[in-house]
Amino acid sequence: MNIRNHGIVEGRLTRDIEVFKNKDNSHKVFVTVAVENNYKDTKGENKGKRGVQYIQLQAFVPEKIQLEKSVYNYLHKGDLVGFAYEMRSNNYKDQKTGQDVYSQICFITDVDLRQPKRTEQQDENSELVEDEIEEI
């Protein structure tokens, strides 16, 4: 990890991942994670509440790694996930206009599956277990 060019975010996925297949059978993966601010708003209608930042990240899955066997196959909307990333320049020449385009991307270097989104079925099961514990 390059100490001068990295970051870590942890939050919930705002939607299922987007995957695009490249011509060489590799894949580009896009995720958006909602990250809670570490401070509360002091003014306005959200006073006393923590705001949220929406961070977009990208990953690359080489052809030799099957997407179905990668960590990205297990990510779903609502999951709590941690990502390590590095900033990368994404500079290219626009083929239509001929102009140079400069942008930055957060490129995923590591994924930490923290907690899947709780489903209604899981909530019902946990309530049943709690009821059984109370009876004991």
Image: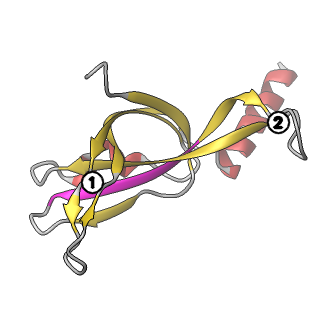
Mark 2: secondary structure:
loop
- Judge by depth and name the residue closer to the eye, 117 or 54: 54
Residue farthest toward the bottom in the current orientation of the protein:
96
Look at label 2 and name its amino acid.
Lys
The answer to whether residue 71 is left or right of residue 36 is: left
At 26% from the left and 52% from the top, the residue drawn is 90
- Judge by depth and name the residue closer to the eye, 106 or 96: 96
Mark 2 or 1: the one toward you: 2
Magenta: main secondary structure equals strand
Q: How is the image coloured?
A: secondary structure
The answer to whether residue 80 is left or right of residue 118 is: left
The answer to whether residue 54 is left or right of residue 92 is: right
Look at label 1 and name its amino acid.
Glu
| Relative to 99, residue 121 above or below | above
Q: Which residue is mark 2?
A: 49
**Relative image position of residue 47 (x, y in whole percent):** 88, 37
Magenta stretch? 26-34
Q: Quadrant of residue 94?
A: bottom left
At 33% from the left and 62% from the top, the residue drawn is 19
Q: Which residue is mark 1?
A: 68
Callout 1: 10 Å neighbours few (<14), some, many (20+)?
few
Q: Quadrant of residue 133?
A: top right
Mark 1: secondary structure:
helix
